[in-house]
Image: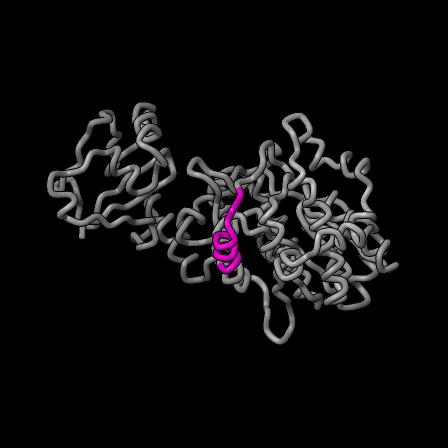
Amino acid sequence: MTNVFDVLKERGFIKQTTHEEEIRELLGKESVTFYIGFDATADSLHVGHFLQLMAMAHLQRAGHRPIALLGGGTTMVGDPTGKTDMRKMLTVEEIQHNADCFKKQMAKFLDFSDGKAIMANNADWLMNLEYIPFLREIGRHFSVNRMLTAECFKSRMEKGLSFLEFNYMIMQAYDFLELHRKYGCKLELGGDDQWSNIIAGADLIRRVEGESAYGMTFTLLTNSEGKKMGKTESGAVWLDSQKTSPYDFYQYWRNVADADVQNCLSLLTFIPMDEVRRLSSLEGAEINKAKEVLAYEVTKIVHGEEEAKKAQEAARALFGKGAMAGSIPTTEISREEFAEGMDIISILTTTKLTSSRGEARRLIQQGGVSVNDEKVKDISLVIKEEDFKDDGLMVKKGKKVYHKVKLV
């Protein structure tokens, strides 16, 4: 049976490890309890989280036990990693709401039945800590000099690092210790930007418990130019269908660059690597077949097979390859509201194709908006009921983003 470490390595997940040979041996000889933390900073997981959930799914399929740790406590502080300014302070209620949303989404990717996976929340132990005892038991194991060399802190030294955020590394390390004590957790995983925090936790377990603990980071999801994937003109690509529709989600993957196909197929699907290599070796127009497979498979994992089929049919229909499906994002507007017609800028903001009237104005001036396949040239254009076809009004942003407006 193939060692899951080799599977993750072949597919391109693994970036850094604390002890590569020991981790590989451990994953090959016993069922290992491991964890990844997810701070509840938004009400949906996004594509960056999805890569980590896929890694967790590979490990679970190989017989290991995942802990999905919700950061109810750490979100109160905010991870300074990769941020030039302090994160927005969320209320306890906002964090709880976001954590509840994460729980529902994670259940799609991991099997939590019969103790096969654990859902935990670090608020359970962090929120009730007593400051002086915590400093004496845990704080004494951390060297400030060493902490300041960590990349997550170095990048903030110019603008200023708050004492609040400086505690984040200690809190994350303490999470690993707590999960080690509660569940026998031996391995912490995370994005490569979490390396400093992960090795701090493994080191803390060795110092406090005198036991072995390990860390492993995953490559961040970037394109062939090294830029983070999962961003569009309108913002992040979310896993919540209310924030990014299955159609828009499908279209994002259908339109990745040719050079990114193999990486995305390897990291974001369960397609065997022989087939991944075959698909990604296609050239010219043939590579579009691989992109269709990628978009379909990723959408199926996140939104289910039915939504993936609808999105695929709708995408093909827009390129003249099939019958129109009802999966294109649609906004319904009441006939009463439309009695006098509606200006194009209001339509763009109502459908959320643009986030502001200013953005809508600029997009029209740049020739980036079409209505029913006619390019909009006038920012004061008013759309009236007679402009609607039987199946609604089709608004296009740029070359690839479609949205339907219906009157009800």
Locate residue 153, reporting x and y percent.
70, 35
Residue sitting at the far bottom: 114
Can I make out residue 329 in this image? yes
Res 117 quadrant in image: bottom right
Q: Nearer the viewer, residue 398 or 379?
A: 379
Q: Nearer the viewer, residue 301 or 332?
A: 332
Locate residue 166, reporting x and y percent.
69, 40
Q: Give the side of residue 146 with respect to residue 91, left or right.
A: right
Q: Give the side of residue 60 with respect to residue 347, left or right.
A: right
Q: Residue at x 75, y 68 (%)?
A: 31
Locate residue 277, reporting x and y percent.
63, 48
Res 115 quadrant in image: bottom right
- Asked which colour scheme the image uses, the reply is one colour
Q: Nearer the viewer, residue 267 or 281?
A: 267
Residue sitting at the far top: 365
Locate residue 193, reporting x and y percent.
68, 41
Residue sitting at the far front: 132
Can I make out residue 10 in this image? no
Q: Residue at x 39, y 53 (%)?
A: 242
Q: Residue at x 31, y 44 (%)?
A: 403
Q: How many marks?
A: 0
Q: Is residue 88 magenta?
A: no
Numbered range of the magenta stretch: 89-100
Q: Main secondary structure of the magenta part?
A: helix
User: Where does the N terminus fall, quadrant-wise?
Assistant: bottom right
In the image, residue 319 above or below residue 124: above
Q: Give the side of residue 76 with respect to residue 252, left or right.
A: right
Q: Residue at x 61, y 56 (%)?
A: 54
